[in-house]
Every structure is written in C-alpha cells, then in structure tokens.
Image: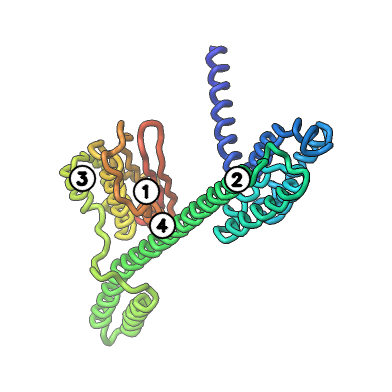
C-alpha cells in the first residue's frame, strides 16, 4: 500500500508539473525568456570566431556581449525597434547575423507587414555598407553574390515568418472577439426568452386576478368591500400594463416555453434520432411554477441536442428531482468511444444559454466531463409548489 501511495503521489506530481509547465510556456513573458535563451545559445556558437577573427574580444567578454544582445529580446513585444537597432549594432560591431533574424521576426510579428518590410530593407542596406568597409569576415560572404545569398534570405525569411505569425494573431483575436460576441448574443436571446415567459405566465396570473376581483366586486356590490375589490382589480390591471411596458419585445412565435409535460416528447424525438433517453422525473416536480418548468425544459432540450451532436447513439439519462426546497436537474451521457465521422455544426452558445436560464431564477449551473461521462447539473430553488 505504501508503494502504491508513493506511485500515485509521483503521478499526481508529474501531472501537476505538466499542467504548470504548459501554462507557463503559454505565458508571453515565458515565451520571451525562452526566445532570448534560444538566441543566446545560437549566438554562443560564434564565440570562438568573435574571439579570434571578427573582433578582439576574449571568450568571456564575447559571451557577455552576446548575453546583453539576447536580453534585448525581452522587450521585443513592446519596443521591437529597439531590439532591431541593437541587432544592427551587433551586425556592424561583431558581424553577428543571428540576433538580426530574431529582431526582424519580432518586427513582422508585433508591428505587421510594413514594419517587417522596412526592417528587411534597412537590414540589407546596412549589411551592404558594412560589407564594403574593411574588416568584413570572409565566412560571412567574400563576394557580392555570396554576401547577398547569405544576408537577403535570412532577412526575408525571418520577417516573412513574423508577418505570417502576425496574421495568425489577428485571426485568433478576431475569432475570440466573434466568440465573445456570439456568447453575448446568446445571453441576450436567452434573456429575451425568459422575459417572454415572464410576460406570458405572470401576465396570465395578473389577468385572472383582475377578472376574479371584478367578479367579487359585483358580488359585493353595495357592501362595505365593493371599493376594495375594485381597487384590487385596478391594481392587477396596472401591474399588467407595467409588465407590458417593462418586458422586452416578445418573440415572433408568441408561445411560452413548454414545461415538464413536453419532456416525454423530447425524449421520444431523441430516441428516434438514435439516442435513447431514460427520463426520471419526480412527481412533485410537476407542481413547480411555470417559469421553473420552462427552465427545466430549456436545459433538457439543449442537453439532448448536444448529446445528439457530440455523442450520437449514446444513451442519455435525464433526472429531475425535488430535494427539500431545491430542484435538481441532471443530464448525463457516456463519452463516445470515437469522434463523430463529421464535425458537428455548433455555435458554441448552448451552454451559455442554459446557464443564463438557470441563473435567472437564482440557481447554479455546471457542465463538464466526469470520468467517462459528460454531465450537466443545475440546482435552483424549487419555490412554492402548486
């Protein structure tokens, strides 16, 4: 048992270290540090040449100078032109081309295509001037053709890769913005549906209250409570008018969200589509208010749709229980052994809509994998049962 516990501890520690490493490697600052270290490692290969041919530096001073140059890459996101200027300085002083590659990439990545093109032109022009001055090392190109075949591809390739990465960053940013917009739109749609249900259900009760009060007022005509019933009827009508003014524009269909009575039909449709449903509904749940029944229907409907998309053919279990004064909704299905043959078409906002519906009535919502199953769980106040 002691060995088993030790093995489990090692596995947990390795998993934690892996998660922390993955999270750390994705941080911008960590990427800059890794880039600087990579540049320094590549430039260190030139230390013997710097100490003998390119410059009179000894090995220690050459390594220190290269470390300072590589450290400038820590600023490549905010001030890539500074890294570029330092790279040109190293090119003129130590004839070092490696740092220029990282600098040109940074220009293209963080300042775009125009900056990358200007950087390449400046780099090639400066290198050409240095090539024509005395002291240019032969291993960096002893003829004009060899010089151009070395310098030009380095600059163009580095800047081109940076520009391509910049385009990918823009695409990811646009996709993230679109996803956020879709999420906000889904929340707004769900709020509109909730408002429509409030209008339908509460408005109906206010109308019945007004009518009932008018009937009682007629029965009490001439009695001491006649005016009270009239005031009650007018208060109900006034509340209904305020409800109409406050609630957002109703949907074009004008129909409220169905309740628990419509769940068997949802389960039957899901079964005909290939995903059998086991529906377990507490009898007391049918006494829930219409708004809470609408919330249950919304969650179950979206869960069955998601199961059909992402786990076709897998059985789905739907449980609706009343526990004390809390309503619990749980929908689960096994994860598919293999991915669907075609990627499901999804807007990715169904979870957001369900969560908004549940939180609108004071509940909490959770969705995710648990072992080999996918579970959606919602808890909300049961309210007063009819």
Q: Position of residue 356 (x, y in %)?
A: 41, 57
**Marks 1 and 3: CB-CB under 8 Å?**
no
Residue on which the image places disc 2? 145
Q: Quick one: 82 or 215, which is closer to the camera? A: 82
Marked residue nearer the N-terminal end (1 or 3): 3
Q: Secondary structure at mark 3?
A: helix
Distance Cα–Cα, label 2 vs label 3: 71 Å
Distance Cα–Cα, label 1 vs label 2: 79 Å
Marked residue nearer the N-terminal end (2 or 4): 2
User: Callout 4 environment at 10 Å: few (<14), some (14 to 19), or many (20+)?
Assistant: many
In the image, which disc is placed on residue 97?
Answer: none
The quadrant holding residue 20 is top right
Identified at 43% across, 53% down, the residue is 363
Which residue is outermost to the front?
A: 143
Marked residue nearer the N-terminal end (1 or 2): 2
**Marks 2 and 4: CB-CB under 8 Å?**
no
**Marks 1 and 2: CB-CB under 8 Å?**
no
Distance Cα–Cα, label 2 vs label 4: 66 Å
Marked residue nearer the N-terminal end (2 or 3): 2
Distance Cα–Cα, label 1 vs label 3: 24 Å
**Marks 3 and 4: CB-CB under 8 Å?**
no
In the image, which disc is placed on residue 327?
Answer: 1
Q: Secondary structure at mark 4?
A: helix
Q: Position of residue 151 (x, y in %)?
A: 62, 46
Lateral position of residue 114 relative to residue 194, left or right: right
């Amino acid at each position: 048992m002691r060995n088993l516990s030790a093995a489990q501890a090692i596995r947990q520690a390795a998993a934690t270290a892996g998660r922390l490493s993955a999270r750390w490697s994705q941080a911008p600052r960590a990427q800059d540090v890794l880039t600087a270290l990579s540049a320094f490692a590549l430039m260190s290969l030139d230390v013997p040449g710097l100490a003998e041919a390119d410059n009179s530096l000894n090995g220690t001073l050459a390594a220190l100078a290269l470390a300072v140059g590589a450290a400038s890459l820590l600023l490549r996101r905010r001030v890539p032109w500074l890294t570029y200027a330092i790279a040109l300085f190293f090119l003129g002083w130590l004839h070092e081309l490696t740092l220029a590659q990282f600098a040109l990439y940074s220009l293209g990545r963080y300042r775009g295509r125009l900056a990358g093109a200007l950087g390449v032109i400046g780099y090639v022009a400066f290198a050409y001037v240095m090539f024509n001055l005395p002291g240019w090392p032969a291993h960096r190109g002893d003829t004009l053709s060899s010089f151009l075949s070395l310098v030009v591809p380095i600059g163009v390739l580095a800047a081109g890769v940076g520009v391509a990465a910049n385009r990918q960053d823009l695409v990811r940013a646009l996709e993230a913005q679109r996803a956020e917009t879709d999420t906000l739109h889904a929340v707004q749609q769900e709020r509109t549906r909730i408002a429509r249900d409030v209008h339908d259900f509460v408005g109906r009760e206010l109308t019945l209250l007004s009518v009932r009060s008018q009937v009682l007022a007629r029965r009490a005509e001439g009695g001491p409570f006649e005016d009270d019933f009239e005031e009650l009827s007018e208060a109900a009508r006034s509340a209904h008018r305020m409800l109409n003014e406050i609630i957002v524009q109703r949907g074009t269909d004008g129909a409220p969200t169905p309740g628990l009575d419509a769940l068997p039909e949802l389960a039957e449709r899901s079964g005909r589509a290939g995903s059998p449903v086991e529906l377990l509904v507490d009898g007391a749940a049918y006494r829930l208010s219409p708004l809470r029944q609408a919330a249950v229907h919304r969650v179950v409907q979206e869960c069955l749709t998601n199961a059909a998309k992402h786990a076709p053919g897998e059985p789905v279990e739907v449980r609706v229980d009343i526990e004390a004064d809390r309503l619990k909704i749980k929908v689960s299905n096994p994860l598919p052994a293999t991915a669907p043959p075609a990627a499901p078409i999804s807007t990715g906002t169904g979870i957001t809509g369900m969560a908004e519906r549940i939180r609108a009535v004071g509940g909490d919502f959770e969705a995710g994998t648990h072992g080999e199953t996918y579970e959606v769980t919602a808890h909300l106040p049961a309210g007063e049962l009819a």
